[in-house]
Amino acid sequence: SDVYKRQELHDIKAKGEGAADIFEGLKMNKSIVQLELSFFNFSEEEIELVSGVIKANNIITDLDMGLSEIGSEGTKKIIRTLKANHSIKKIGMKIVDESGEGLMAIAEMLATNEAIKCLSLDCNVNDSRAIEELGEALRD
């Protein structure tokens, strides 16, 4: 029978090598299917580490970053990585993206990644074009 496993990482203070060790372990883990990364203030390096987990781990089906504010650049990096990951079916993100670039990246990703079945976004976006693009992608 399948083993259901969930890993919650809340407000971890590990930085540098400590954070790298955690995410390196998640790359190799083959039993965790739900990964919740809450209350993080992600640095650019940590976004790279999360992207590495998404690239390397094809077991995770649920990625919840919903309580961690992610800026436009971080969102674009995560979403670029999700274009090639077809195991993740559910995504939760909190996006602080005045420019709308992060939402535009999500719309582009949805056009190529049909594995995503549940998308939960908490967004602070002032770009109506980006909102329209996302709406179009969700209709398809």
Image (cartoon, rainbow, N blue to C red):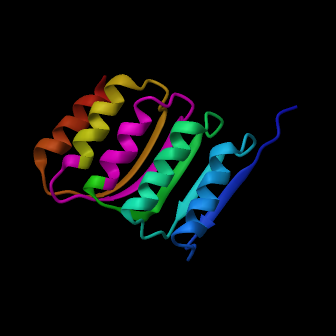
Residue 123 in percent (x, y) is at 30, 57
Looking at the rendered image, the quarter that the N terminus falls into is: top right
Residue 135 in percent (x, y) is at 24, 36
Residue under the image location 49 percent in, 53 percent down: 49
Instruction: Pick the residue in front: 129 or 68.
Output: 68
Per the rendered image, the range of residues in magenta is 74-101
Q: Is residue 83 above or below residue 39?
A: above
Q: Kindly tell me whether residue 84 is visible in this rendering.
A: yes
Magenta segment: does it hold 124?
no
Residue under the image location 68 percent in, 43 percent down: 28
Badge count: 0
Q: Which quarter of the figure has residue 134? A: top left
Q: Residue furthest bottom?
A: 13
Residue under the image location 75 percent in, 48 percent down: 5
Magenta segment: does it hold 94?
yes
Residue under the image location 52 percent in, 53 percent down: 64
Q: Which quarter of the figure has residue 21? A: bottom right
Instruction: Pick the residue in front: 54 or 66.
Output: 54
Instruction: Pick the residue in front: 120 or 43.
Output: 43
Residue 22 in percent (x, y) is at 63, 60
Q: Residue furthest right?
A: 1
Locate residue 33 relative to residue 12 in the image: left or right: right
Locate residue 3 relative to residue 122 in the image: left or right: right
Q: Kindly tell me whether residue 33 is visible in this rendering.
A: no
